[in-house]
Amino acid sequence: MPFKIYGFPPSTCTRRVALVCKELNVPYELIPVSIPKGEHKAPEYLKRQPFGVVPAIDDDGFTMFESRPVARYLVAKYGKGSTLVPDPKDIIATAKFEQAVSVENNHFDEPAGELFLQLVIKPMRGLPKDEERVKTLLATLNSKLDVYEMVLAKQPYLGGDILTLADLFHLPWLYGLTEKAKLDLVTSRPNVARWYQEISSRPAWQAVKDGA
Amino acid sequence: MTLKLYGRLQSTNTQRVILILKEKKIPYELVEVEFGQNNQPERLQFQPFAEIPYIDDDGFILYESRAIARYLVAAYPEHGPTLVPPPSAGLRAQALFEQALSVEAFNFYPTVSSILMERLFKPFIGQTPDEAEIATLTEKLDARLAGYERVLSKSKYLAGDEVTLADLFHIPLLTLFGLGQIDDFTNDEKVKKWPSVARWANELVQRGSVQA
């Protein structure tokens, strides 16, 4: 029975799960949950995802939600030999991986996501941009990417020497901000540029970047 | 060499680490980083985002409070309660634990810390809370608590019937609900909407105060 993703093809978090499926060659069936039609708030869907957001997954009867934990589950179940998550027996590598994942959560996701909302989603819906808010968010995101530039000058990936989920988790927002919002976030940062060029050119991302 | 924790007692992120150190009965030394001193060069070399806390465990430096907590659990397995599912619990238990951690990080922490930023931090630095923003954030939080109720009406804790790091990570902010005038668990009308969450929240605050 194929791995089922209940999601919305253009959604950031749905694509994040689809990306990891592609990385691990896990075939999936995408069952559409229409955000414009409000299907993510329907009682049936809330049984799968109690917070009413996409995606949720069903792996042969095992259901869960939250895109990043789903990614970890995919690696644990289908990623034999995968280095996308370090071996838990390597306590130091695991700690550095968790630090990098936490950095993406706490420093990157919110400003990046809200910038995308302001610069891409709002215009699409005919809503006015909040220029003051955009200025603040850009300042925040740029200051964070300045730190990324320093970190990536000393090591090839955010968790250390090996590419992990911590790097891949950035792809949906970074792609959206650079390609759709046309923000120049990387050209002035050679190490971030090198890192982004590498992760964004991976075939798995190319396969799902415009829709899971 | 005793583990050194660089932070401040008033910082909720430092408190998150102290909570786990105390739960696990791991000896530590708190090195006070004064407010406004995070970006001193001797601090930035260890925590490049100019934040606290970070630890120095016999030369191993780590930042991000949740990553530190996960490291402590892995590095000190014989100390205190396990707080994470054991390997014998299997893939699915591990996945549900990761799901619960993600719920705290994305569905609780950002919204609650923004409310507390308005109510507590702004007055501290001589600014006025933005009541309109607080109203929007409160609406968001209430919607999330409805999600929590769907989960906690079916299991005692977020990842199942045992307490884990995912529950404990909420304690520093839950403890500030009173001071921050967030009445979700003290207002009888609100408690009726999420009685399981109220039970869980009050138990956690109690647990946190015992450890303090």
Image: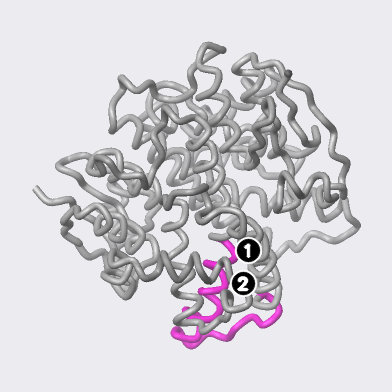
User: Is A84 within the magenta?
Assistant: no
Residue at horizontal 50 percent and vertical 16 percent from the top: B77
Q: Earlier in the sequence, mark 2 or mark 1?
A: 1
Q: Residues within 10 Å of mark 1 (few under 14, many from 20)?
A: some
The subunit letter for the residue under badge 2 reads A
The answer to whether one can see residue A38 in this image is no
Count of numbered badges drawn on the protein: 2
Residue at horizontal 56 percent and vertical 51 percent from the top: B141
Query: Over which residues does the magenta segment extend?
Result: A110-133
Could you tell whether A55 is left or right of A182 in the image?
left
- Dot label at residue A189: 2
What amino acid type should be assigned to the residue bearing mark 1?
A: Glu
- Dot label at residue A149: 1
Disc 2 element? loop
Residue at horizontal 47 percent and vertical 61 percent from the top: A170
Disc 2 to disc 1, C-alpha distance: 6 Å
Residue at horizontal 42 percent and vertical 27 percent from the top: A89
What amino acid type should be assigned to the residue bearing mark 2?
A: Arg
Could you tell whether B153 is left or right of B111 in the image?
left
**Where is residue B187 drawn, in percent x and y?**
62, 39
**Marks 2,1: beta carbons within 8 A:** yes
**Where is residue B108 drawn, in percent x and y?**
55, 46
A46 up-or-down from A127: above or below: above
Q: Residues within 10 Å of mark 2 (few under 14, many from 20)?
A: some
The subunit letter for the residue under badge 1 reads A
For the residue pair A115 and B61, the one nearer the viewer reads as B61
**Where is residue A194 drawn, in percent x and y?**
51, 69
